[in-house]
Image (cartoon, rainbow, N blue to C red):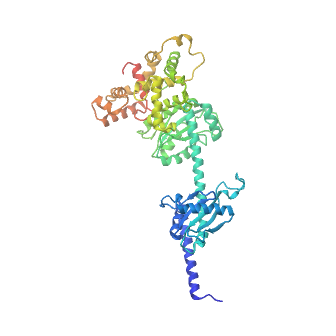
Amino acid sequence: MAASPSAARADRADRADRADDVLVLARLSAKRGAVRAILEWLTRRTGGLAVLVRADGSVRAAPGGTPDPAGSPLAARAARGAVELHRRGAPSAVLGGDGAHPVHLVVLGPGPGAGPDRAAGDGAAGAVYLAVVRPDDPRCGVLLADASRTLALCWRLEEAERARRRVESAEVHSREAVLHLLMVGSVSAAQRIAGALRPALPAVAQVYVIECPSVRRREIAVRIDRTARGRAWIVPCPVRPNHLIALVPSEGDPGPRDRGPGPGRLDRMIARDVPECRVGVSAEVALRDTPVGYEQAFHALAVARDAPERCAGFGGHTDVTVLAGPEGRTWAGEVLGPCLRYAPTRKADPGPRELLDTLGSWLSFGGAATRHLKIHRNTLAARVRHLDALLGLDVGRCLASQSAAWLALRLHTAPWTAGAVNAATADRAATLDALLATPAAEIWAQAQLRPLEQARLTAGPETVRAWLRADARLPATASALGISLPGARKRLARAEDALGRSLLRAPSAKYELWLAMRALGTL
């Protein structure tokens, strides 16, 4: 029997509406945040609340703009419905159809990680359900059948993207851990972790510090990796979001047959291809000297900011370990001794190693040490106060104390040969002034200050001296010189160019300059 004209018109209208709904779903699926967008549309279209619920009753996604949808009574009803449907093992159902709040459910399929080898042996344990609570659309069943197909694909894509980001974050944090171990001298531990992540750490390398927009760090890392043929160790800087750190094997580093880029080639390539970048490159350093290489590269970056080529290599001489003789080691041991012998009263308190790591990070990065050490700023402040009390210094505010602690850390971690400290020197009282009065200290100090003197800047040495006397504080420096704050900043920026060292940004050369002027008696 042929359908009546009115029934035919109604059928055509239903088909047209369904086609429109499918087109809307297709458009929404192409949006960023497609799952939430589709749930918002379903909520408006059906007049109910559309949510995604796992088989364990947890709400996984809800429409945006709804006040606490996961904690609402309707969402709770959807969660109970998903648990019940999972218990029955059915792919779809309408639960509570005879009540005031019916729940329409349809399974989207098992989520990532679900499968026959799950812990409970139940592959559906990770199933995700589309639930619509209390809809007022009589065609809700057909609409959910159409929406579930598109929503399942969008959900799996978003879950895969979240999984990718988790893996990427884990790798970044692992690489940060390797860099941190190198910076605190734990080379063997760093090599073990790097061996699992790949590539292996180079025995001899140049350290690159690249300053660039944070959104371009990934692109630049790919360029470095490709140019270095996969042998560079690349880490997004944990302290500065616009810095990228790379350990690039030197030409003489033993390794695979494929050699890395030639000296000076990689930095020019980065600066040429990415004009927003500035690149600082260290001299070749052994793996154990990565902290020295990082500081050299950072100082070179200060020069690169104003260089026409936007890149610079380190050309100075900062090896303070020339003072690491018997007297220097004895003095360093006396300065750091209270910390090295410290026994925490509580298990949760930091031990000597953590305290020394905190001291080194504080001296290098100041308040940004919180990002380097991954600790709260109150924790950092408490540790610095504890170090002040232990060492009898004021490393929190006083540049003289900071410089002494910096030198003690350098001499304490410097390579040495057995028997370097004999009984005669161990019994001799060691002081910083006595250490800086040695011929080796005088030669080192003259090398630090010679570029500033040769540059013949207007009031260059006087400005740096006033800055050091003011504990490296710009307002006090400007006041002492009788000039404006911008004027003092410009003078120090010119001193940076002359020295080829970073002064105004940490890690700063302020400790070396303070020690050098103290050794020469000009401070």
Q: Is residue 221 visible?
A: yes
Rendered image quadrant of residue 21? bottom right
Relative side of 169 to 470, left or right? right
Please, is residue 371 above or below residue 115 in the view? above
| Residue 122 in the image, given as x and y percentages of width and height | 71, 56
| Residue 34 in the image, given as x and y percentages of width and height | 54, 62
Q: Residue furthest front?
A: 99
| Residue 256 in the image, given as x and y percentages of width and height | 66, 38
Count of picture labels: 0
Q: Which image quarter holds the N terminus?
A: bottom right
Which residue sits at x=59%, y=15%? 419
Please, is residue 391 above or below residue 379 in the view? above
Please, is residue 5 above or below residue 489 in the view? below
Relative side of 396 to 290, left or right? left
Q: Residue furthest top?
A: 424
Q: Residue furthest left?
A: 482
Q: Is residue 283 visible?
A: no
Q: Which image quarter holds the C terminus?
A: top left
| Residue 241 in the image, given as x and y percentages of width and height | 48, 43
The residue closer to the viewer here, 225 or 392, is 392
Rendered image quadrant of residue 424? top right
The residue closer to the viewer here, 427 or 313, is 427
